[in-house]
Amino acid sequence: MTTNATVGYSYVSYGTTSMEKAQTNMNDSTIKDYLDNWYESVFLKTEYERYITDSLFCNDRTLYYTTPSGYSQLGYGTEITAYQWYDLNSNGVALNCSQQNDRFTMDEAMGNGALTYPVGLITTDEVYLAGGYNSSNSGYYLYTGNQYWTMSPYDFNGLTAGVRIVDSEGLADSYNYVGNSRGVRPIINLKADSLKSGDGTANNPYKVN
């Protein structure tokens, strides 16, 4: 059964009449399983893993600031609920993650401790700040010409969960529902002392060794 819980990177699968319980992280989502498998195949027990650090990935399930028409904003079961990134135009961009359950990390001291490996997805906030806002942009590093998922919930429409995507023009102004197939771009974070040379440009990329 698809419920509000499935907007989470991890989620509960049982029925509940509590938003707090619906946002408890007990079962891995399909995309978290996919990213964990990718990490295992590319980095696990390789020489490159020593450059990767545990960092915070934000699956922001904060409720939208007001109640849209037709939404209950109860945030559990099949209640129709809008989340923080329901409306791009009225939402402020921020890099903080206010809810502890949404702060995905391996280390419980830094976040929720729910990650198996230090890998996640980009947030809509980060796409905006990088250049994916207002008009098409094919000239920044997040542009691929294809659609791919972010980690920012959009809504639950009573049947399935919606999540923000980066569209084929490089913009974060679209969303899709999790039953549909879109691209995946895993995100890892490097330790501060990993970069040995380069300035990040195409002609002089960063190098870690």
Image: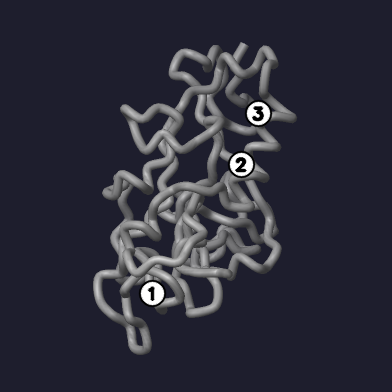
Q: CA distance from mark 2 to mark 3?
A: 24 Å
Q: Residue sitting at 50 percent across and 29 percent down?
A: 189
> Residue 19 location in percent, x, y?
33, 63
Q: What residue is pinned by disc 3?
A: 203
Count of numbered marks: 3
In the picture, measured across the screen, residue 23 lies left or right of residue 158, that is left
Q: What residue is pinned by disc 1?
A: 81
Task: Kindly report which numbered mark, 3 or 1, lies closer to the viewer in this rendering.
Answer: 1
Q: Residues within 10 Å of mark 3 (few under 14, many from 20)?
A: few
Q: Amino acid at mark 1?
A: Thr
Front-lying residue, 171 or 42: 42
Task: Kindly report which numbered mark, 1 or 2, lies closer to the viewer in this rendering.
Answer: 1
| Res. 174 visible in picture | no
Earlier in the chain: of badge 1 and badge 2, it is: 1
Q: Quadrant of residue 188?
A: top right
Check the picture and name the quadrant holding the C terminus. Answer: top right
| Res. 188 visible in picture | yes
Residue lying at the far bottom in this picture: please name it.
69
